[in-house]
Amino acid sequence: MSRPSTRHSATLIAGCVTAGLIALLALVSLLWVPYAPDDTSGGRLAGPGGGHLLGTDKLGRDLFTQLMTGSRIAFEAGLGSVLIAAAIGITLGVLAAFTRGWLDDTLAALLDILIAFPTLLLAMLVVAARSATLASAVLAIGLAQSAVVGRLVRILVKRVLAQDYITAARTSGTSWPRIVAGHVLPNIWPTLVVNLALQFGLAILAEAGLSYLGLGAPPPNASWGRMLQEAQATFTTAPAGALAPGILLVMLVIGVNLIADGLRDTLDPAARGRR
Amino acid sequence: MNITKISLYSGAALLGLTLTACGGGAGGSGAAGGAYDKNATVNIGSLYEPQNLDNTAGGGQGVTEALNGNVYEGLFKLTDTGKVEKLLAKDYKVSPDGLTYTFTLRDGVTFHSGKKLTSEDVKYSLEKVLAKDSQSARKSNLEVVKSIATPDARTVRVRLSKKSISFVYNLSYVWIVNSQAKNLKTSEDGTGPYRLRKWTRGSALALDRFAGYWGGAARNKQAVFHYYKDATALNNALLTGAVDVVTSEQSPDALDQFKNNQNYKVSDGNSTTKLLLAFNDKAKPFTDVKVRQAVSSAIDDKKLLESVWGGYGKLIGSMVPPTDPWYEDLTKVNAYDPARAKRLLAEAGYKKGFTFTLETPNYDPHPIAATFIKSQLAKVGVTVKINTITPDQWYTKVYQNRDFTATLQEHVNDRDLVWYGDPNFYWGYDNKQVTQWVDQAEQASTTAEQTRLLKKVNRKTAEDAASDWLYLYPQIVVANSKLSGYPVNGLNSQFYAYDIKKG
């Protein structure tokens, strides 16, 4: 087999650079931000430049500071949701694929229902049961995505289980946990990672959507979605407030998708062969 | 964003007939001095679509905006400047003990269905407001009504159980409906200058001039209310000419595009909508007057108003806006003074501050105000946890169950100071003296006496920091300059369309 072509690596590198820049912002925000998040000394809707790189919002808070905090929240939302989705999805998917019979059917039906259930509605339910926090939003997104992951894992595992080497392993007396760890997971891993990377991007978008609706991270947390919502009314007079979080959101999601594409090209032997 | 104003109507909105402050600017002048199109269609843009068309069935503020005065009329009307004038009542007499009101109805009034107005309809309409299932905002105010008699077709006699100086004012909120009418949630039968042509849910409500109107005919042929979910879309509609006037702008930042354009006229009228940081006066630590005063002194209201509304709006030091007769400038009471706030906190035993949860409705301007309050209170050592809730949650959790420590809420009505006289109201302010003053004011014989007593209530509640009154909203109407004669004050969210001339 040939090495992945340079075009494929370029995709991965472009993705890593784009998302990496924002990851860097998020990391730096843990240690340092230009202004305190609740510092309202900047004056209403000050323009970019001067003491404030991107200007200020209605309350006089520094926009760049909010963007940095927002990128941290975006990563928290993305990682948190994907972790929940992976944990639940992989468990259910493997379980369904192995059990077959009525349990498989039930689980498959459950996953299909969960997929059909709008993420937004699910999030509203979770928020109503708990309260509007980042954790609630992450939980809701993670639950919704676990169905997608679960269904994918179920199909992938079933395909692997039909292979001869599994039959060989079983006849040689290998225990089920060892088959899962040693044969199944390594074989579905490439496809799964690509899917999880895509889910990461989707989770960030979903969190921004929820925050836009006031169902995500509560104020004063500077989620990008909340920033967009707050800047909506002042878009004609102070466009930076809406443009900046919008551009970062697009950059991050595109970056993550490029990474997913690059990973697929690098990891998935089937796809590699076709090129 | 869909802006849901939770409209909490007064337990006893008090009013004298003539003693009203009239502060509003005049309607837009524009091109139409005399020449105007008598058959014009006026397109009105609004964010408040009615839920249904019955104001005793929870239709929301949109019902008042579209139908009050346009389709339905009361015995009295509240003008745009806040005066109460006779409308369907030609005359009325009050007995010396103040308990019997005798109304004589105007002649020649017919409903849109063609039936003549009689005293039976008035009785029916009043009873409809007082009915058990009525959700009328004025139900509790009118519960002083003991009996309604109709000696003849043109006379209505109402007996009250106790004196009520604001009875006539409250009647301006009671629509006179045909007693034989059906399906009032989706159709209408009033006496107003317009009849309903068509209500397209989610989009528009069209009114046609009523040919059989008893008074002066509407100055335009059609008034159409167009409903938008989003303020930006509404402003765009005005820019593209899809609507001629916007009833109430909700953000100052869109205004520049109209202010610098001679095709539009921006009016800054009087509003009665106040933004409150309402403490639960029955929950610790806000049971302590010093803590309430401290929090009020720690928040720079001026900066908040500037942040949310640019140069618009006004500061208030109490529940009373300048248009209420018992207004007094109390902005100096518990004014912004962080040093005083720290001192008061120390005196109350909270030298190291405390933490409380602020129940914050999830629509503008509450989240931004909550953020601001959090940052201000942090400077005096008080930690605020912001809990975002929906309007429904606010209604059950805060308003009904009183399960809160402090909350943000906008209060839209005029003359709603009197709620501080009700110890069972959601904010739990309980001062026997204030309750007594409010009671006496309602039973006062003269408006001067009423005003004197309510001024005392005003000052006392302000000094006690019963709530923290952050600011008074502006009421901004933007119209095409071809338009004139539209209301600019939007008291209680009514919008009379019949005087609008389109040049």
Image (spheres, coloured by chain):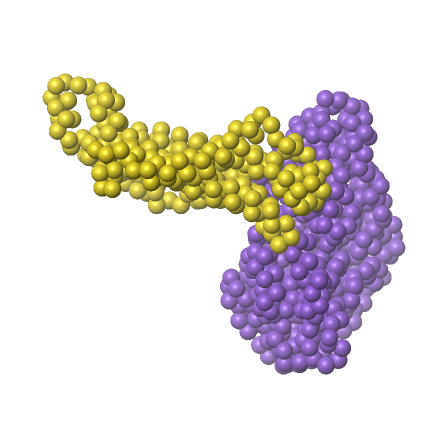
Residue B403 point in image, percent of width and height: 61, 35
Q: Colour of chain B?
A: purple
> Is residue B33 rendered to the left or right of residue A33?
right
Residue B478 point in image, percent of width and height: 68, 63
Q: Is residue A119 above or below residue B87?
A: above
Q: Is residue A90 above or below residue B393?
A: above
> Is residue A80 rendered to the left or right of residue B431?
left
> Is residue B227 rendered to the left or right of residue B336?
left
Q: Quadrant of the C terminus of chain B?
A: bottom right
Q: Which chain is yellow?
A: A
**Residue at image location 51% in from the left, 67% down from the top:** B200
Residue A221 point in image, percent of width and height: 58, 35
Residue B95 point in image, percent of width and height: 82, 63
**Residue at image location 56% in from the left, 68% down from the top:** B205
**Of residues B274 and B457, the one drawn nearer to the viewer in this rendering:** B274
**Residue at image location 51% in from the left, 61% down from the top:** B202
Q: Is residue A123 visible?
A: no
